[in-house]
Image (spheres, grey):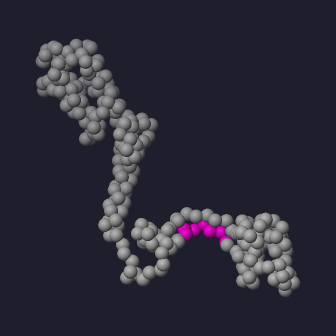
Amino acid sequence: VEAINAFQILQANGYCALNESVYEPSRVQFIADRSWLEEVEKQYPSLEPLIKILLRTIEGIFSYPGIISENYLAKLTKTERETVVDRLKQLKSLGVLEYYPTKDQPQLVLLSERLKADYIRIDMKAVEKRKELAKERLASLMSYTTGDVCRSSFIGHYFGDADIKDCGICDNCLNRKKRIPSRQTIEERIMQALQAGPTSLSQLARQIIESSLDKTPEPATDSRPETELYWKAVRRLESENKVAITEDGEIALKGHGSNHRLGSRF
């Protein structure tokens, strides 16, 4: 991990290019002329079948590298894959071809001449900035895994979608639904809270939602199920003439406050 981080810092400063995941199939290209090729076939008879198959199956093998499969060559030559690889390496050592084995590991490419460590200059401000961003990403990941907000909503807000609503089907949404009391319970809590006197609709909403979840809630937005349940309870109590809503946005028990109804609220 430390080596990868070091390479990433060098890459950010323009000294190298790091490809963390690269797959390149095996390739071969003949570099010997016809006379040397025939000489090798005479001196090393065991290599002749592989040479013949490569010449017959790969078009333009003298002009540019051709893609091969060691397993397929092993099947054609009726040998093991390891044997084909050994013979390809032998042909390379004899100057017959260039053999490029499969690459499926991270690849490092130097973008400048090799320098002594004393001559390498690293932008430490950029390094510190990368550390801070990494800490923020880790903190967000921890909040996502341990928090109780909607999973979809959390991801949407992380990527800048401020209008996303709770999905209602993730584990956190389902757990919140289990904790939400019935409308009748909320109505009883509203009536009990209003015994102390009139209060604003928004303040009462925060109080009722907080008591419903038994914890400090998220901002009470209209999209949250407990908020919607609160407003339904208020509308029902008002329709039953148990509460009155004033024009200045206050709610009170019927007879304890002004009877001027705020009709635009609903």
Q: Is residue 102 located in the magenta-colored stretch of the structure?
A: yes
Residue 121 in sight in this render: yes
Residue 111 belongs to the span the image colors magenta: no
Q: Quadrant of residue 230?
A: top left
**Residue located at (87% from left, 84% from top):** 42
Magenta: main secondary structure equals loop
* 136 or 121, nearer to the observer: 121
Q: Nearer the viewer, residue 184 or 104?
A: 104
Question: What's the residue at 38%, 53% (across, down)?
Answer: 141
Which residue does the image show at 29% across and 24% down from the upper left? 231
Quarter of the figure with residue 200 = top left
> Where 41 falls versus 18 (above or below)?
below
Please indicate whether residue 130 sits to the left or right of residue 197 in the image.
right
Please report the bounds of the magenta region as a residue range: 101-107
In the rendered structure, the answer to whether residue 257 lies left or right of residue 56 reads left
Q: Position of residue 6 (x, y in %)?
A: 42, 72
- State whether residue 10 is above or below residue 244: below
Question: Looking at the rendering, in which quadrant would you find the N terminus?
Answer: bottom left
Residue drawn at (36%, 63%), measured in percent from left and top?
Answer: 130
The reply to whether residue 131 is visible in this rendering is no
Query: Residue 100 location, x and y as percent?
Result: 67, 72
Position in image of residue 218 (x %, y %): 29, 40
User: Image quadrant for the C terminus?
Assistant: top left
